[in-house]
Image: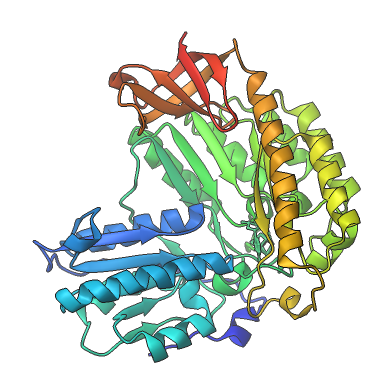
């Protein structure tokens, strides 16, 4: 048994990260059994689940989308805000209930919540029916933990800086678009954020390995890759022979895979070189997710973001000027401890100036172990909720306005599948990452097709094949 430790999770040394190769020497021993895999949180977790799914399939399990049919349940969890925590414990309650009827049901908890000391203590003390707890650093231990599972709860979570894994196999969600990890962890330590503790130190994969993976995906018919990292534009700084994110992007662009995306960018490491690189290549999509977090320089300083309101605006302008028809989305936190009305108005001012294509907005949620949690806060929850509502109203208006500008225009859409709401329609994304629904034949799935936009809504577009 190995328990997570918050103090250890904070440690950063200048030791270079080790490259480890995954091993897959286990047999298909659970044939005729079913797994249910549930994922919470960000794209990183979605991609980790593709790895988890691969292991489960290699053990012989088949996937079910119905919890009640499962012989094994794996919850891949998120720790970014408290509400994610509540959802998972709610779901564990359902699993516990099911285990009464199915005593052999294996319940496994992984992901970022498993890296939290308090969560694991709670599981240990109050939820003995959870069989396996594994962390973000040892997803590859899961098969062995399943094979060795006994009556007793097994917890293996490591609070280490972390390794770089190569030759990881995935059972991917899509045959058209693929996630590609370019780095793990984060060293920014924004004062509100738990990620540096749950995901460890920033470790970049080597450029050649990433390019090789993209080439293989292209060979396999993939049309799009999304390069993944908590901080993609800090890519390569930690390597023995440092490379920049723009150097990586150029090499990936030269594979000629039709579409390249990347998330998430931090304004701090966003260089002019990078902007010019994005502008230069047709297959690097003109879409940037650029978290603002707050428009108040005072709050940004307390958040440890290392840029001011003015610097953010300047960067935003430069991106808009240099990348043709770029769309920019953002993340905003309201109600950081002691945020005043004036601070909040600064945020609204940036939103009004930038007119984002979209924004994910959150109320600040205190996370154990982070510095911001220690700040005594004088703002009421009600006030925070009101600010969120005011912000959302403006944000949604700009999404709609930006979408409206596309009415009557022709956009290239990569079709991904049949729309859930209407089986005569396909859904896909424009280069700028806008969701489009179009009446079209399913033979177009996986193709990039010109579409005329007929109607804009706040969060999607309707169109017809042009
Ligand atoms: N409370 C609220 N939102 C948070 N985020 C990160 N940490 C917190 C927190 N403690 C938001 C940030 C980040 C996004 C992924 O989640 O906006 O960009
Ligand atoms: Fe969290 Fe800041 Fe790192 Fe993003 S950059 S993962 S907000 S610490």
- Quadrant that contains the N terminus: bottom left
| Residue at (49, 70) in percent of width and height | 86
Q: Nearer the viewer, residue 125 or 275?
A: 125
**Can the viewer see residue 17?**
yes
Is residue 50 left or right of 192 when viewed as pictured? Answer: left
Whether 354 is drawn above or below 444: the answer is below
Q: Could you tell me residue 405's position as x and y percent? A: 67, 18
Whether 188 is drawn above or below 117: the answer is above
User: Splitting the image into 4 quarters, where does residue 417 fall?
Assistant: top left
Q: How many marks?
A: 0
| Residue at (38, 40) in percent of width and height | 217
User: Splitting the image into 4 quarters, where does residue 141 fall?
Assistant: bottom left
Is residue 100 left or right of 425 when viewed as pictured? Answer: left
Whether 396 is drawn above or below 265: the answer is above
**Can the viewer see residue 22?**
no
Q: Could you tell me residue 122's position as x and y percent? A: 45, 85
Q: Could you tell me residue 366's position as x and y percent? A: 67, 72
Q: Please, which residue is most extreme toward the front here?
A: 382
Quadrant of the displayed image that contains ligand 2: bottom right
| Residue at (69, 76) in percent of width and height | 370
Q: Nearer the viewer, residue 298 or 97?
A: 97
Q: Could you tell me residue 455's position as x and y percent? A: 55, 17
Q: Nearer the viewer, residue 12 or 431?
A: 431
Q: How is the image coloured?
A: rainbow
Is residue 208 left or right of 65 when viewed as pictured? Answer: right
| Residue at (45, 59) in percent of width and height | 40
């Amino acid at each position: 048994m190995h328990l997570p430790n918050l103090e250890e999770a904070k440690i950063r040394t200048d030791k270079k990260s080790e490259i480890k190769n995954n091993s897959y020497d286990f047999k298909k021993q659970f044939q005729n059994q079913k797994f249910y895999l549930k994922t919470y949180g960000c794209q990183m977790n979605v991609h980790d689940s593709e790895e988890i799914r691969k292991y489960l399939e290699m053990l012989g399990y088949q996937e079910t989308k119905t919890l009640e049919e499962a012989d094994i349940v794996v919850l891949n969890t998120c720790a970014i805000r408290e509400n994610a925590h509540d959802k998972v414990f709610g779901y564990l309650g359902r699993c516990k209930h099911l285990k009464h009827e199915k005593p052999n049901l294996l319940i496994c908890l992984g992901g970022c919540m498993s890296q939290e000391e308090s969560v694991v203590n709670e599981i240990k003390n109050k939820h003995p029916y959870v069989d396996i707890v594994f962390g973000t650093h040892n997803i590859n231990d899961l098969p062995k933990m399943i094979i060795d599972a006994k009556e007793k709860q097994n917890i293996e979570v490591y609070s280490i800086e972390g390794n770089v894994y190569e030759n990881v196999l995935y059972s991917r969600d899509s045959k058209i678009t693929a996630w590609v990890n370019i780095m793990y962890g984060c060293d920014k330590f924004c004062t509100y954020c738990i990620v540096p503790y749950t995901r460890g130190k920033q470790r970049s994969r080597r450029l050649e390995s990433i390019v090789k993976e993209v080439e293989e995906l292209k060979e396999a018919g993939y049309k799009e890759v999304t390069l993944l990292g908590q901080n993609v534009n800090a890519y390569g700084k930690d390597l023995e022979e440092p490379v920049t994110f723009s150097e990586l992007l150029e090499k990936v662009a030269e594979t000629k895979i039709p579409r390249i995306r990347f998330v998430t960018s931090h304004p701090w490491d966003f260089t002019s070189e990078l902007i010019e690189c994005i502008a230069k290549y047709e297959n690097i999509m003109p879409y940037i997710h650029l978290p603002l977090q707050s428009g108040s320089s005072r709050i940004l300083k307390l958040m440890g973001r290392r840029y001011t309101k003015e610097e953010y605006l300047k960067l935003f302008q430069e991106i808009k000027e240099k990348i043709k028809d770029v769309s920019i989305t953002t993340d905003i936190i309201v109600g950081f401890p002691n945020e005043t009305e004036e601070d909040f108005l600064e945020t609204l001012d940036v939103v009004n100036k930038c007119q984002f294509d979209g924004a994910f907005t959150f109320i600040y949620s205190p996370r154990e172990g982070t510095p911001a949690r220690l700040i005594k806060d004088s703002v009421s929850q009600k006030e925070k909720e009101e600010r969120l509502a005011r912000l959302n109203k403006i944000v949604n208006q700009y999404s709609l306005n930006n979408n409206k500008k596309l009415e009557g225009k022709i956009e290239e859409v990569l079709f991904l599948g049949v729309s859930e709401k209407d089986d005569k329609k396909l859904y896909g994304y424009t280069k700028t990452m806008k969701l489009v629904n179009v009446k079209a034949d399913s033979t177009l799935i996986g193709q990039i097709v010109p579409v005329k936009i007929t109607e804009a809504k706040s969060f999607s577009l309707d169109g017809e094949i042009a």
